[in-house]
Amino acid sequence: MTYYQQISKIRGLVLDIDGVLTDNTILVTDQGEFLRSMNVRDGYAIKRALDAGIKIAVISGGKSFGSKKRLEIIGISDVYLGVEDKLPVLKQVLQNWSLSPGRYCIHGDDIMDISCMKYVGLACAPADAVPETLEIADYISPRKGGDTCVRDIIEKSYRLKQFVVIAVLRLVRWPNLLIIAAAQLLIYFRFIHHSVPETSLLFSCTDIALLVVCTLLVAGAGFVLNDIFDQKTDAVNRTKNIVPKLISVRRAYQIYFSTIFLGTLISIYLAWKYGFLMSWIIFPATNFLLYLYSSSLKCSLLLGNIAVSVFIGFSLLLIPYANWQVFLNENFDNKWFAFQHIAILTSFAVCSNLFREIIKDIEDIDGDSSCDCKTLAVVWIISSKDDRCLCTHDIIWN
């Protein structure tokens, strides 16, 4: 499990005082009092986390009652001082809060924190922690103890949770979906909706929107599945692979099946409402073909490129197909004009996507060749390179 996946599950934070909330320095007064310094910015971040529902406890081997008062003012009620063996206290804290160890993060800096760091889901350490602690830490903050290292981990948690939405949008290739939706709506409103009287229209605007959403769910599910199957090639190509770096494989499958389920409900509703019961088979058939593309066709010579390009063209033709009865209406103005322009638009979409797929294969040639994919780029470029090398070898030695 990656650090990104671990931190996304964190619901509790356990902190040390000396070396984490402080800089490991103790000031001794003439009266024999021990004074520690805490960073105000750490305190602000802790208060924000508490307000957001994150549970926070402090377990320390020191006995600084001034620090305890400071932490209680911030809002931390679970403060344990003078603890020599921290693990039993940590287990008791987790039991009191009814959370599994995997949902907790501990920020420690010294040897006495190691047993606790091994017990919880995410172990963090400041930059100046002892080597033994740094060795087992899942995350090492660039900040030192007492220098906002606690704020660093809290803010990363906030940022990651905000980034999850962005990661999901990237996973489903939102720009591609936006282009598909714009093209479908353009075809409907330019060539169908304004060409016949409103009473002659088959679909309401709401149902056309549902049809577009259904198409986007199919396409989005295909993109998710493609990322799941592309983990090895993405790792070789060093692309910004979302699965499993930002989204786990399990979560990606959950997104995939959720989109398929929602799309199935919408397609059944539209097929039942407009009497296209036989046409409903298009939805599962398309999902199956996209599965074949991700699992095998994409590694074949041109076949995968052609298949996905045809899907793009079909997604545009879905709108006129669903409204074919409108085209037969005698009141339809400029029928052949609409046919010609829809055909041109669809052909352009198919051809441009085919070229895009070939260019992408060239960019991903290293990963595809390492996974024995016989794409056009692998067969043409690498095979040609091997032939040139063989000819050069023959010339030199013969």
Image: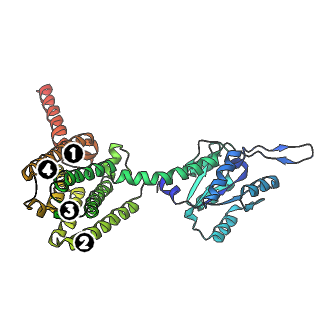
Residue lying at the far right of the rendered structure: 31
Q: Amino acid at mark 1?
A: Glu
Q: Is residue 118 visible?
A: yes
Determine contact: label 1, label 3, CB under 8 Å.
no
The numbered dot on residue 357 is 1
Q: x%, y% of residue 185?
A: 24, 53
**Tag 4 or tag 2, which sits nearer the N-term?**
2
State the image quarter where residue 188 is shown.
Answer: bottom left
According to the picture, the residue beneath numbered tag 4 turns out to be 342
| Disc 2/disc 4 C-alpha distance (Å) | 26 Å
According to the picture, the residue beneath numbered tag 3 turns out to be 286
| Disc 4/disc 1 C-alpha distance (Å) | 22 Å
Pair 2/3: label in front: 2
Q: Amino acid at mark 2?
A: Ile
Q: Residue at x 73, y 45 (%)?
A: 24
Pair 1/3: label in front: 3
Determine contact: label 2, label 3, CB under 8 Å.
no
Please state, as top left, top right, bottom left or bottom right, where the C terminus lies in the image.
top left
Helix, strand or loop for disc 4? helix
Q: Nearer the viewer, residue 54 or 383?
A: 54
**Tag 1 or tag 4, which sits nearer the N-term?**
4
Q: Is residue 104 left or right of residue 184?
A: right
